Image (spheres, rainbow, N blue to C red):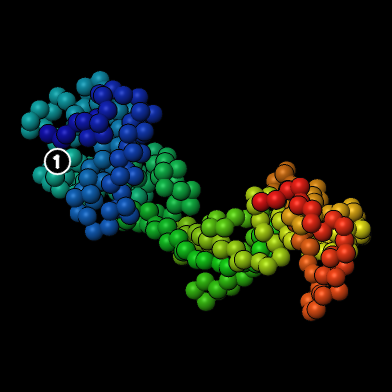
């Protein structure tokens, strides 16, 4: 006598088909041959739960079984011990290959040998179900005589170094994967260590695998990224700091003219609103840090002027 298909799937007898499908989905993912390569126990378990699901997925057969009109072998319940049963080895749940010739699910491989109108692995409903379970690309791609869908291509991991300016503005780069050139769109605001996924650009299969590109941002002497904001240093002369001046500030989006106020100090931050990184509906700012720089060479003349300056011994109001 075959094992009760409800017990095989771990659901209560008479459970609705939606619950049966949910239980099968969970078990099929766990024991599928692609997830357990070379594991014969898992392969047999997969066949067993597949046969149980195929048995119950035929609504007419399920109703008869639920009403006690047929047994788990599909035989009329009045057939008794000697009537109408399957031959030895064809038991769908109790040993032997349920998909072999003479078995109760013969012709119901994933390749689709079942007669029109019957349930089983060849039926459109079953193939649609497998497409939902393992990816839409698998639907209709099951080969004659196979008990597993086509293999998905492997994901490929790669690394890409980019300039800081590329992370700020975005860019397009090309990398070589297995001898083929792949173009990658770098979005503005990409972060250090972020992985970009290019679907279908990985290993060949049905469907193809994905290409996973990990981004590394190279240090830059001009720009520093903090979130969506960009920071930069601006060296100014002592005269510009004291008297003020009009200066050109280089930014990733081009130079911007700015007026320095008199008595500007080193370390002072000036903000250019909306000149940072654009990401989605948000835009950061650009910050300029002023640094007073003395000219190269002999500055003894400046020293003499400072010695005669009445404020040369005054302590700055802000120190440390």
Give the answer, above or below, for where 103 lies relative to 302. Answer: above
Rendering quarter of residue 188: bottom right
Left or right: where does residue 103 sit relative to residue 305? left
Residue at horizontal 74 percent and vertical 55 percent from the top? 267
Query: Residue 104 occupies which quadrant of the picture?
Result: top left
Residue 71 vs residue 143: left or right? left
Look at the picture and state if 184 lies above or below 115: below
Nearest to the observer: residue 231 or residue 214: 231
Residue 219 position in % (x across, y down): 62, 66
| Residue for badge 1 | 94
Q: Tag 1's secondary structure?
A: loop
Q: Could you tell me residue 306's position as x and y percent?
A: 84, 65
Look at 82% across and 70% down and name the residue there.
303
- How crowded is the residue under tag 1: few (<14 C-alpha within 10 Å), some, or many (20+)? some
Q: Nearer the viewer, residue 251 or 1?
A: 251
Indicate the position of residue 169 as horizontal and vertical percent values: 72, 59
Position of 102 compared to 165: left or right? left
């Amino acid at each position: 006598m075959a094992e009760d298909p409800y017990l095989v799937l771990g659901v209560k007898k008479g459970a609705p088909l939606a619950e049966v499908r949910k239980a099968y989905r969970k078990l099929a993912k766990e024991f599928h041959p692609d997830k357990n390569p070379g594991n014969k126990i898992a392969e047999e378990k997969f066949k067993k739960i597949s046969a149980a699901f195929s048995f119950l997925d035929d609504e007419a057969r399920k109703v008869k079984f639920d009403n006690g009109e047929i047994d788990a072998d599909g035989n009329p319940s009045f057939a008794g011990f000697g009537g109408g049963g399957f031959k030895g080895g064809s038991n769908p749940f109790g040993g032997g290959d349920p998909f072999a010739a003479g078995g109760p699910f013969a012709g119901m491989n994933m390749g689709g040998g079942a007669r029109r109108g019957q349930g089983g692995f060849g039926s459109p409903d079953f193939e649609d179900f497998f497409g939902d379970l393992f990816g839409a690309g698998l639907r209709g791609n099951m080969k004659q005589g196979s008990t597993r869908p086509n293999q998905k291509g492997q994901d490929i991991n790669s690394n890409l170094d980019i300039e800081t300016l590329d992370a700020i503005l975005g860019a397009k780069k090309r990398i070589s994967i297995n001898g083929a050139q792949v173009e990658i769109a770098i979005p503005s605001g990409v972060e250090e260590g972020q992985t970009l996924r290019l679907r279908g650009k990985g290993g060949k299969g049905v469907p193809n695998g994905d290409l996973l590109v990990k981004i590394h941002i190279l240090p830059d002497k001009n720009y520093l990224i903090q979130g969506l904001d960009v920071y930069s240093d601006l060296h100014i002369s002592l005269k510009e700091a004291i008297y003020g001046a009009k200066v050109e500030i280089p930014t990733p989006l081009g130079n911007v003219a700015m007026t320095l106020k008199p008595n500007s100090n080193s370390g002072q931050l000036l903000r250019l609103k909306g000149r940072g990184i654009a990401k989605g509906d948000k835009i950061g700012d650009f910050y300029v840090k002023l640094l007073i720089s003395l000219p190269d060479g002999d500055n003894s003349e400046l020293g003499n002027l400072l010695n005669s300056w009445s404020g040369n011994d005054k302590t700055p109001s802000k120190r440390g």
